[in-house]
Image (spheres, rainbow, N blue to C red):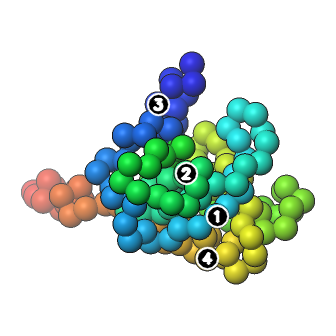
């Protein structure tokens, strides 16, 4: 059931679901965040890595090629990232929302929170689907009289 849910939402915790992204080198952003659990809503501190439109998390910060991801969020599936201190009543909290769910995180400081929101927001814009020239319909060329 959990794997079906993950497939439907685009979320996964499979160690090999990084689509060739070398998460262990030169991330766009990396650092500790406290994340609310998916099923049991406890808070756990995880090491997060943002790279090439994917937000990975790990149990510890010693990330290597052999590291097992604890989860990954394809940023292109995300709609918004914004502060959530008022929602959770917790300092430095922010939320990341997809069509089907909202995930909550807590940074270690206001600056870290803002840096994560900015980095994830920039990645959402860069990796969201945009209209390309081949998709633009030229209505004038079809209506020649």
- Residue placed at 84% from the left, 56% from the top? 87
* Closer to the eye: label 3 or 1: 1
Residue 122 drawn at (x, y percent): 49, 71
- 125 left or right of 20? right
The numbered mark at residue 115 is 4
The numbered mark at residue 32 is 1
Looking at the rendered structure, the secondary structure element under dot 1 is: strand
Q: Residues within 10 Å of mark 1 (few under 14, many from 20)?
A: some
Q: Earlier in the sequence, mark 3 or mark 2?
A: 3
Which of these two is toward me, 28 or 64?
Answer: 64
Residue 79 drawn at (x, y percent): 56, 55
Q: Earlier in the sequence, mark 2 or mark 1?
A: 1
- The residue pinned by badge 2 equals 58
Q: Earlier in the sequence, mark 3 or mark 1?
A: 3
Residue 19 drawn at (x, y percent): 31, 47
Q: Earlier in the sequence, mark 4 or mark 1?
A: 1
- In which quadrant will I find the C terminus? bottom left
Whether residues under marks 3 and 1 lie with C-beta atoms below 8 angstroms apart, the answer is no
- The residue pinned by badge 3 equals 7
- Residue placed at 57% from the left, 24% from the top? 2
Residue 60 vertical placement versus 107 (above, below) = above
Which of these two is toward me, 70 or 89?
Answer: 70
- Residue placed at 83% from the left, 64% from the top? 85
Toward the right, the furthest residue is 89
- Residue placed at 55% from the left, 61% from the top? 61
Looking at the rendered structure, the secondary structure element under dot 3 is: helix
Toward the top, the furthest residue is 1
Measure how far apart labels 2 and 4 are at the Cα level.
19 Å
Regarding residue 139, the answer to whether it shows in the image is no
């Amino acid at each position: 059931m959990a794997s079906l849910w993950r497939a439907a939402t685009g979320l996964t915790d499979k160690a090999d679901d990084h689509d060739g992204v070398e998460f262990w080198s030169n991330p766009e952003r990396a650092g500790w965040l406290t994340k609310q659990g998916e099923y049991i809503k406890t808070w756990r501190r995880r090491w997060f890595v943002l790279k090439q439109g994917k937000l990975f998390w790990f149990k510890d910060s010693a990330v290597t090629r052999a590291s097992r991801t604890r989860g990954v969020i394809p940023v292109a599936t995300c709609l918004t990232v914004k502060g959530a201190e008022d929602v959770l009543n917790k300092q430095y909290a922010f939320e990341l929302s997809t069509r089907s769910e909202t995930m909550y995180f807590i940074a270690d400081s206001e600056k870290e929170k803002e840096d994560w929101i900015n980095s994830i927001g920039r990645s959402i814009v860069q990796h969201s689907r945009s209209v390309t020239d081949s998709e633009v319909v030229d209505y004038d060329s079809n209506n020649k009289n």
